[in-house]
């Protein structure tokens, strides 16, 4: 069983300006975004991470830098497949103006039919395919006992969560992924389990194996297997 922590980059200057950044370079974390990621790094301090995979865009690289401060044991990789949607002509434009574009309704109600206009514009379906493929290939590469981080973007993370939930891409706008949030998915041989979604402050210590137990053994005893917990189970509380 492999566990992936899907982390959205911290808040950026583009977020506060209401601009769709896309693949625009030079978009940095603002002070709030830096503080958000530093708080998340502290929450992850006791979690033994196998690796961190990041989008190559600056805001994600800065987020990865903060998450890995003092963690030289975590291997770091860049993967463009978890990079932002290529928004084409929409890149760099204000969201309030884009909301008046007829294609906005397609993005909201039928995203699987949306291909962003202009040179290099990507379809939502292509983005979802590359992102889900990347995560599942990293699961295989890193192994069954891995707990690793993917630092990515809102729509990309929503697409991975929709896949894990068995949702059609047209439903992925029901999912919220805030800056510096963490969503946790455990992949088992039978099905993925979405353990957390858009978590902004919860205790993440349950991801660390308990003393004297391997991670895989701890998961078996805590009920995280390929079988769903009928009735809901006892949760992750250790007290």
Image: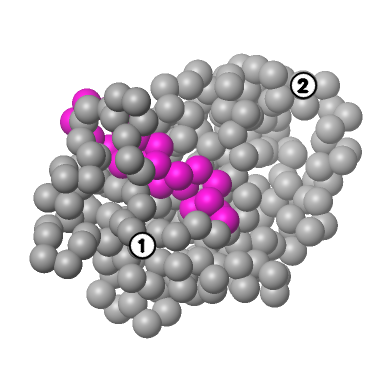
Q: Is residue 188 magenta?
A: yes
Image quadrant where one finds the N terminus: top left
Q: CA distance from mark 2 to mark 1?
A: 41 Å
The image quarter in which residue 97 lies: top right
At 65% from the left and 67% from the top, the residue drawn is: 33
Q: Which mark is residue 131?
A: none
The picture places residue 59, in percent across and down from the top left corner, at 58, 63
- Ranked by sequence position, the earlier of labels 2 and 1 is 2
Give the structural element (helix, strand or loop) at label 1. helix
Apparent side of residue 13 relative to residue 153 in the rendered image (left or right): right
Apparent side of residue 68 relative to residue 62 in the rendered image (left or right): left
Q: Which residues are magenta?
A: 181-200
The image quarter in which residue 108 lies: top right
Nearer to the camera, 66 or 115? 66
Residue furthest bottom as drawn:
70
Residue bearing the label numbered 1: 205
At 48% from the left and 21% from the top, the residue drawn is: 167
The picture places residue 233, in percent across and down from the top left corner, at 32, 35
Apparent side of residue 56 relative to residue 236 in the rendered image (left or right): right
Closer to the camera: disc 2 or disc 1? 1
The picture places residue 76, in percent across and down from the top left corner, at 33, 65
Residue bearing the label numbered 2: 105
At 49% from the left and 53% from the top, the residue drawn is: 182
Q: Is residue 116 above or below residue 82?
A: above
Q: Is residue 126 above or below residue 60?
A: above
């Amino acid at each position: 069983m492999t566990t992936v922590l899907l982390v959205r980059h911290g808040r950026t200057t583009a977020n506060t300006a209401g601009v769709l950044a896309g693949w625009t370079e030079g978009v940095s974390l603002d002070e709030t975004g830096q503080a958000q990621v530093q708080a998340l790094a502290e929450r992850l301090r006791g979690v033994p991470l196998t690796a961190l995979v990041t989008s190559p865009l600056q805001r994600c690289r800065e987020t990865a830098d903060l998450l890995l401060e003092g963690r030289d044991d975590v291997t770091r990789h860049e993967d463009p497949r978890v990079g932002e949607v290529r928004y084409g002509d929409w890149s760099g434009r204000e969201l309030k103006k884009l909301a008046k574009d007829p294609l906005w309704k397609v993005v909201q109600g039928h995203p699987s039919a949306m291909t962003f206009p202009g040179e290099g514009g990507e379809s939502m379906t292509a983005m979802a395919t590359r992102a889900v493929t990347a995560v599942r290939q990293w699961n295989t590469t890193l192994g069954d006992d891995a707990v690793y981080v993917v630092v990515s973007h809102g729509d990309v993370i929503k697409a991975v969560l929709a896949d894990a939930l068995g949702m059609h891409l047209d439903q992925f706008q029901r999912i919220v992924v805030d800056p510096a949030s963490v969503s946790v998915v455990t992949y088992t041989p039978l099905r993925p389990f979405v353990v957390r979604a858009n978590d902004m402050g919860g205790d993440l210590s349950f991801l660390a194996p308990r003393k004297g137990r391997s991670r895989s053994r701890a998961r078996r005893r805590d009920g995280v297997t390929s079988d769903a917990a009928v009735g809901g189970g006892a949760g992750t509380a250790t007290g």
